[in-house]
Amino acid sequence: MDINTLFRPELLQVQDFVRAAYVVLDANFPPGVLGSVVEMAREAGCKGALYAVVLDPTSYAKAAKCLEVLEKVWMVTPDRHEIRKLAGEEEEEGIEGVKQAAERLLQRFSGLQYVLCKVDIDGVILVSRAGVEHFPAFPVASVVNVSGAGDCLVGTLVSALTKGKSLTEAVQIGLQAAALSIQANETVPESLRSL
Protein backbone atom coordinates (compact mmCIF):
# COMPACT_ATOMS: atom_id res chain seq x y z
CA MET A 1 0.00 0.00 0.00
CA ASP A 2 3.02 2.30 0.17
CA ILE A 3 2.45 3.26 -3.47
CA ASN A 4 -0.43 5.45 -2.24
CA THR A 5 2.04 7.70 -0.43
CA LEU A 6 3.42 8.72 -3.85
CA PHE A 7 0.06 10.06 -5.03
CA ARG A 8 -0.05 13.87 -5.34
CA PRO A 9 -3.19 16.06 -5.39
CA GLU A 10 -2.00 17.91 -8.50
CA LEU A 11 -2.65 14.71 -10.48
CA LEU A 12 -6.38 15.41 -10.12
CA GLN A 13 -8.64 18.19 -11.35
CA VAL A 14 -12.14 19.21 -10.32
CA GLN A 15 -13.54 18.11 -13.68
CA ASP A 16 -12.45 14.54 -12.82
CA PHE A 17 -15.32 14.52 -10.32
CA VAL A 18 -18.08 16.36 -12.19
CA ARG A 19 -19.94 13.21 -13.27
CA ALA A 20 -19.31 11.24 -10.07
CA ALA A 21 -22.31 10.39 -7.93
CA TYR A 22 -20.03 9.24 -5.10
CA VAL A 23 -16.33 9.34 -4.36
CA VAL A 24 -14.96 6.48 -2.25
CA LEU A 25 -11.67 7.06 -0.42
CA ASP A 26 -9.64 5.24 2.15
CA ALA A 27 -6.99 6.44 4.57
CA ASN A 28 -4.10 4.83 2.70
CA PHE A 29 -3.56 8.18 0.98
CA PRO A 30 -1.54 10.96 2.63
CA PRO A 31 -3.62 13.53 4.57
CA GLY A 32 -3.10 16.26 1.96
CA VAL A 33 -4.54 14.00 -0.74
CA LEU A 34 -7.61 13.20 1.36
CA GLY A 35 -8.32 16.89 1.84
CA SER A 36 -7.78 17.74 -1.82
CA VAL A 37 -10.03 14.95 -3.10
CA VAL A 38 -12.81 15.87 -0.66
CA GLU A 39 -12.59 19.54 -1.69
CA MET A 40 -12.62 18.69 -5.41
CA ALA A 41 -15.62 16.40 -4.95
CA ARG A 42 -17.43 19.15 -3.07
CA GLU A 43 -16.53 21.77 -5.65
CA ALA A 44 -17.69 19.49 -8.47
CA GLY A 45 -21.04 19.06 -6.75
CA CYS A 46 -21.07 15.32 -6.19
CA LYS A 47 -24.58 14.41 -5.06
CA GLY A 48 -25.58 18.06 -4.98
CA ALA A 49 -25.16 19.66 -1.56
CA LEU A 50 -24.20 16.35 0.05
CA TYR A 51 -20.92 16.09 -1.91
CA ALA A 52 -21.15 12.35 -1.33
CA VAL A 53 -17.71 11.26 -0.25
CA VAL A 54 -17.57 7.87 1.45
CA LEU A 55 -14.45 7.47 3.58
CA ASP A 56 -13.09 4.21 4.99
CA PRO A 57 -10.50 4.69 7.76
CA THR A 58 -8.73 1.46 6.68
CA SER A 59 -7.09 0.70 10.02
CA TYR A 60 -6.93 1.85 13.61
CA ALA A 61 -3.48 3.37 13.01
CA LYS A 62 -4.63 5.35 9.94
CA ALA A 63 -8.02 6.47 11.29
CA ALA A 64 -6.64 9.71 12.79
CA LYS A 65 -5.87 10.98 9.26
CA CYS A 66 -9.60 11.07 8.58
CA LEU A 67 -10.32 13.67 11.23
CA GLU A 68 -9.20 16.58 9.04
CA VAL A 69 -11.89 15.84 6.44
CA LEU A 70 -14.82 14.34 8.37
CA GLU A 71 -16.72 17.63 8.40
CA LYS A 72 -16.98 17.42 4.60
CA VAL A 73 -17.61 13.68 4.25
CA TRP A 74 -21.07 12.25 3.61
CA MET A 75 -20.42 8.83 5.18
CA VAL A 76 -17.57 7.26 7.13
CA THR A 77 -17.30 3.46 7.40
CA PRO A 78 -15.14 2.51 10.41
CA ASP A 79 -14.98 -0.82 12.15
CA ARG A 80 -15.62 -1.20 15.89
CA HIS A 81 -12.03 -0.18 16.74
CA GLU A 82 -11.64 2.67 14.24
CA ILE A 83 -14.83 4.41 15.43
CA ARG A 84 -13.32 4.81 18.88
CA LYS A 85 -10.11 6.25 17.44
CA LEU A 86 -12.19 8.74 15.42
CA ALA A 87 -14.34 9.63 18.42
CA GLY A 88 -11.24 9.97 20.63
CA GLU A 89 -12.43 7.44 23.16
CA GLU A 90 -11.10 4.50 25.08
CA GLU A 91 -12.10 1.06 23.90
CA GLU A 92 -15.59 0.23 25.17
CA GLU A 93 -17.18 -3.15 24.87
CA GLY A 94 -20.23 -4.08 22.88
CA ILE A 95 -22.47 -2.68 20.23
CA GLU A 96 -23.88 -0.06 22.58
CA GLY A 97 -20.41 1.47 22.97
CA VAL A 98 -20.04 1.58 19.17
CA LYS A 99 -23.40 3.34 18.83
CA GLN A 100 -22.49 5.93 21.42
CA ALA A 101 -19.11 6.61 19.78
CA ALA A 102 -20.80 7.06 16.39
CA GLU A 103 -23.39 9.43 17.83
CA ARG A 104 -20.67 11.54 19.43
CA LEU A 105 -18.82 11.63 16.12
CA LEU A 106 -21.94 12.99 14.38
CA GLN A 107 -22.29 15.63 17.08
CA ARG A 108 -18.68 16.72 16.62
CA PHE A 109 -18.84 16.90 12.80
CA SER A 110 -22.09 18.58 11.75
CA GLY A 111 -21.45 18.02 8.03
CA LEU A 112 -21.05 14.25 8.42
CA GLN A 113 -24.36 12.58 7.58
CA TYR A 114 -23.82 8.86 8.25
CA VAL A 115 -21.56 6.59 10.24
CA LEU A 116 -21.70 2.98 9.06
CA CYS A 117 -19.88 0.88 11.66
CA LYS A 118 -18.73 -2.57 10.62
CA VAL A 119 -19.06 -4.82 13.65
CA ASP A 120 -17.82 -8.16 12.30
CA ILE A 121 -20.17 -11.09 12.94
CA ASP A 122 -22.72 -8.64 14.36
CA GLY A 123 -23.17 -6.99 10.94
CA VAL A 124 -23.26 -3.21 10.70
CA ILE A 125 -24.72 -0.29 12.60
CA LEU A 126 -25.93 2.71 10.61
CA VAL A 127 -26.03 5.89 12.67
CA SER A 128 -27.48 9.19 11.49
CA ARG A 129 -29.13 12.15 13.13
CA ALA A 130 -32.45 10.39 12.50
CA GLY A 131 -31.45 7.40 14.63
CA VAL A 132 -29.64 4.11 14.78
CA GLU A 133 -30.28 0.96 12.75
CA HIS A 134 -28.61 -2.40 13.35
CA PHE A 135 -28.34 -4.71 10.36
CA PRO A 136 -27.32 -8.26 11.33
CA ALA A 137 -24.72 -10.09 9.26
CA PHE A 138 -25.87 -12.72 6.80
CA PRO A 139 -25.21 -16.27 8.02
CA VAL A 140 -22.44 -18.11 6.18
CA ALA A 141 -21.61 -21.80 5.86
CA SER A 142 -17.92 -21.29 6.55
CA VAL A 143 -15.40 -18.48 6.83
CA VAL A 144 -12.53 -18.90 4.35
CA ASN A 145 -10.93 -15.44 4.21
CA VAL A 146 -12.01 -12.20 5.87
CA SER A 147 -9.66 -9.96 3.84
CA GLY A 148 -11.70 -7.73 1.60
CA ALA A 149 -15.06 -8.20 3.32
CA GLY A 150 -15.29 -4.56 4.40
CA ASP A 151 -14.20 -3.31 0.98
CA CYS A 152 -16.79 -5.53 -0.71
CA LEU A 153 -19.46 -4.25 1.67
CA VAL A 154 -18.67 -0.58 1.02
CA GLY A 155 -18.09 -0.95 -2.73
CA THR A 156 -21.31 -2.87 -3.25
CA LEU A 157 -23.26 -0.48 -1.04
CA VAL A 158 -22.12 2.50 -3.12
CA SER A 159 -22.82 0.62 -6.36
CA ALA A 160 -26.37 -0.10 -5.15
CA LEU A 161 -26.89 3.57 -4.28
CA THR A 162 -25.82 4.60 -7.79
CA LYS A 163 -28.48 2.22 -9.15
CA GLY A 164 -31.22 4.00 -7.20
CA LYS A 165 -31.50 1.70 -4.19
CA SER A 166 -32.42 3.23 -0.85
CA LEU A 167 -29.69 3.39 1.78
CA THR A 168 -31.39 0.57 3.72
CA GLU A 169 -31.49 -1.63 0.60
CA ALA A 170 -27.90 -0.74 -0.24
CA VAL A 171 -26.70 -1.73 3.24
CA GLN A 172 -28.45 -5.11 2.89
CA ILE A 173 -26.83 -5.69 -0.50
CA GLY A 174 -23.46 -4.68 0.94
CA LEU A 175 -23.88 -7.22 3.73
CA GLN A 176 -24.64 -9.91 1.13
CA ALA A 177 -21.40 -8.97 -0.63
CA ALA A 178 -19.44 -9.23 2.63
CA ALA A 179 -20.94 -12.68 3.25
CA LEU A 180 -19.94 -13.84 -0.24
CA SER A 181 -16.46 -12.40 0.25
CA ILE A 182 -15.66 -14.22 3.48
CA GLN A 183 -16.67 -17.54 1.93
CA ALA A 184 -14.14 -17.22 -0.91
CA ASN A 185 -10.35 -17.29 -1.22
CA GLU A 186 -10.33 -14.11 -3.33
CA THR A 187 -10.77 -10.76 -1.60
CA VAL A 188 -13.23 -9.76 -4.33
CA PRO A 189 -14.91 -12.99 -5.41
CA GLU A 190 -16.49 -13.60 -8.80
CA SER A 191 -19.75 -14.42 -6.99
CA LEU A 192 -20.33 -10.69 -6.37
CA ARG A 193 -21.60 -10.48 -9.95
CA SER A 194 -24.76 -12.22 -8.74
CA LEU A 195 -25.72 -9.15 -6.74
Image (cartoon, rainbow, N blue to C red):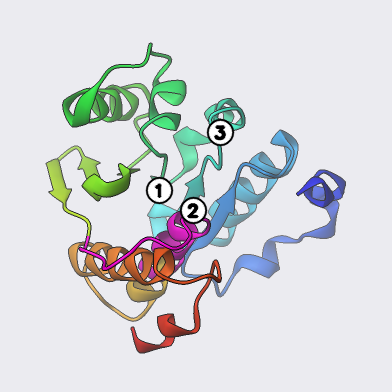
Q: Which of marks 1 and 2 is nearer the N terminus?
A: 2
Q: Does the magenta stretch include residue 13?
A: no
Identify the residue shown where x is 18% and y is 62%.
Answer: 168
The mark total stands at 3
Q: Quadrant of residue 59?
A: top right
- Is residue 47 visible in the rendered image? The answer is no
Image coords of residue 162 (percent x, y): 38, 75
Q: Residue at position x 39%, y 62% from top?
A: 153
Q: Was residue 155 drawn as part of the magenta stretch in this picture?
A: yes
Q: Is 171 positioned to the left or the right of 15 in the image?
A: left
Front label number (2 vs 3): 3
Which residue is disc 3 drawn over?
66
Q: Give the range drawn in magenta.
A: 138-157
Q: Residue 45, image x and y in percent?
A: 51, 61
Q: Is residue 93 above or below residue 185?
A: above
Q: Name the residue under label 1.
A: 74
Label 2: which secondary element: strand
Q: Distance between the residues labelled 1 and 3?
A: 13 Å
User: Which amino acid does the dot numbered 2 rest on?
Assistant: Val
